[in-house]
Image (tube, rainbow, N blue to C red):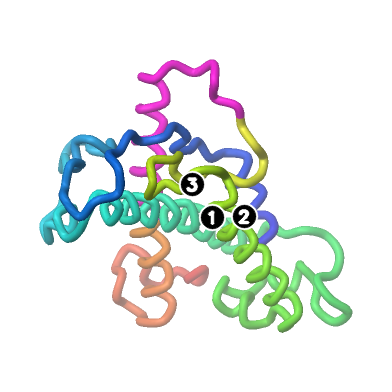
Amino acid sequence: MKTASICLSLAGAAAAFAPISTKPATSQLFLGLDDIGGSSAPLPNFDPLNLATAGSDETLLWFRAAELKHGRVAMVATTGYLINAAGFHFPGMLSSDISFESLSTMTPPDAWAAVPVAGKAQILATIFIAELATEGYQGTHYMKGGSLPTMVFPKIDFSGVSEDTLARKRTSELNNGRLAQIAIMSFISAHYIPGSVPALANNPAF
């Protein structure tokens, strides 16, 4: 289940690839929401808590990187949840006593619980390595004027893509990630709190 979701996410994601221009490190604010992109209808620059002004430029860039990463994780999670709920699975055995087919008959939270500790450790270790790779091992850190976190694998070359197209793709990725965060929270709520999401009520997949 997890492997399938990761593969689909890596194959289909378009990312925020270009560096964002920023002034030297300072506690004074130079950047605003209009400077970092991601604003779109119907709620342009939606920031009811004024988080964009909660700290320095570095803080705002950290918030954007966090939103980007959480959106990507949510897209993987949502894809994995739906794949598992639809009954798709790899052939063969996950471990000596657990088949992929048996996991596909469970709800995703139950399937995760059934994964052996060693399997969970491998998944978490992979996530940890990817996090390290995007937090300081890809050149200048994004809080210091470098590129926002990019996909570790596969490496995609967008050098031939126009700035307008990149900006549109960055906004699309952010919006898809925002929707995916709402989706996966709804799925989990529907599973653990029956009736909390009316649209998913009485659906055996949740």
Q: Closer to the observer: label 3 or label 1? A: 3
Few, some or many residues within 10 Å of mark 1 (<14, 14–19, 20+): many
Q: Label 2: which residue?
A: 5
Residue range (magenta): 157-180
Q: Nearer the viewer, residue 1 or 125?
A: 125
Q: Nearer the viewer, residue 203 or 58?
A: 58
Residue type, mark 3 in image: Pro
* Figure check: 63 above or below 96: above
Q: Which mark is residue 149?
A: 3
Where is residue 46 shown, x and y percent of the image?
16, 48
Evaluate if marks 2 and 1 touch, with contact meaning CB atoms under 8 Å apart.
Answer: yes
Q: Label 1: which residue?
A: 76
Say which label, 3 or 2, has the lower sequence index.
Answer: 2
Q: Identify which residue is drawn at 42% across, 63% down.
A: 184
Give the secondary structure at mark 3: loop
Check the picture and name the quadrant holding the N terminus.
Answer: bottom right
